[in-house]
Image: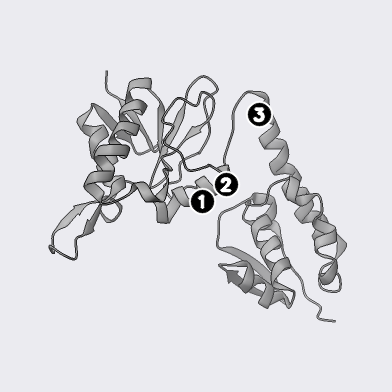
Amino acid sequence: MHAFDFNLECVLAIITTPIRVFIDGENHTTQTGKELAKLLDIPEADGDLLFNAASGLTSAKGGINLTNKLASSANKLTQKEIEQIKNGLAANQAKNESLAGKGIQELNHKATSGAFLTTDPNKTTTILGTYIDDTQYIIKELNLEKSTNFGARKGGFNLLNTPDELYKNPTQFWNEYNKPWLDNVIKRGDNIILATKPIDTKLYRLNTDTGLKELTGFGREYHYLLENGYKYNSKTNQMYKVK
């Protein structure tokens, strides 16, 4: 049996990745569940579960069967350590239930911008950002179906997630789908959260055919809002309409 001291304070803090673990008197930093499993010499499935728990990505429901799922690693993890993980998930659940009682939903995904991804029970909350950095994870967490329904989602989140076959080229997609979707956002007066920081490397890309810099999809959205009287609040990572 491999004996070690496994410090799971990161679970209780519900911090973002990477996470730090303390094993045999040494600090280690892990970026994935696979790396964590290798460090602890446990199955990858258990490593993923632990990593997601420590990153605050595992739902409280997923924590119900936590002990059973870790059975194959029972000789590696003490009951105290398992309880630490369960308590961390329970704390996260209690927080979510408290928000839910107020009609507020908060996502587990940690936006790269640092924005708090929470809803307003009285409005639609629209989230903008780059797919690679943020929105793919948010769409997955919300289990959003691909749709062209651009209507209001009072008390919920709104993201653009259309069927893949509708995209032909950037200009066509912007004119036919992205811009009309954003026009509805503006017309409704949605709360608009930027999950990705609006910096040049996210707003622009290099067109390999022309060699020129052009706006990304996120860049088009950001500049369109600016053109329509919005400003960016760097403290809240939200766009607000100038009155």
Mark earlier in primary sequence (3, 2): 3
Image quarter for residue 52?
bottom right
Q: Amino acid at mark 1?
A: Tyr
- CA separation in Å, label 1 and label 2: 6 Å
The residue wearing badge 1 is 137
Q: Quadrant of the N terminus?
A: bottom right
Residue at figure coordinates x 67%, y 64% from the top left: 48
Is residue 222 visible to the viewer in this orientation of the structure?
A: no
Is label 1 or label 3 in front? 1
Q: Are marks 1 and 2 in contact (CB under 8 Å)?
A: yes
Q: Which mark is residue 141?
A: 2
Q: Crowding near pointer 3: few (<14 within 10 Å), some, many (20+)?
A: some
Asked if residue 88 lies left or right of residue 18, the reply is: right
Secondary-structure class at tag 1? helix
Asked if residue 75 lies left or right of residue 27, the reply is: right
The residue wearing badge 3 is 100
Residue at figure coordinates x 28%, y 44% from the top left: 173
Residue 199, position in %: x, y?
29, 50
Of 9 and 150, the residue lying toward us: 150
Total labels drawn: 3
Image quarter for residue 184?
top left
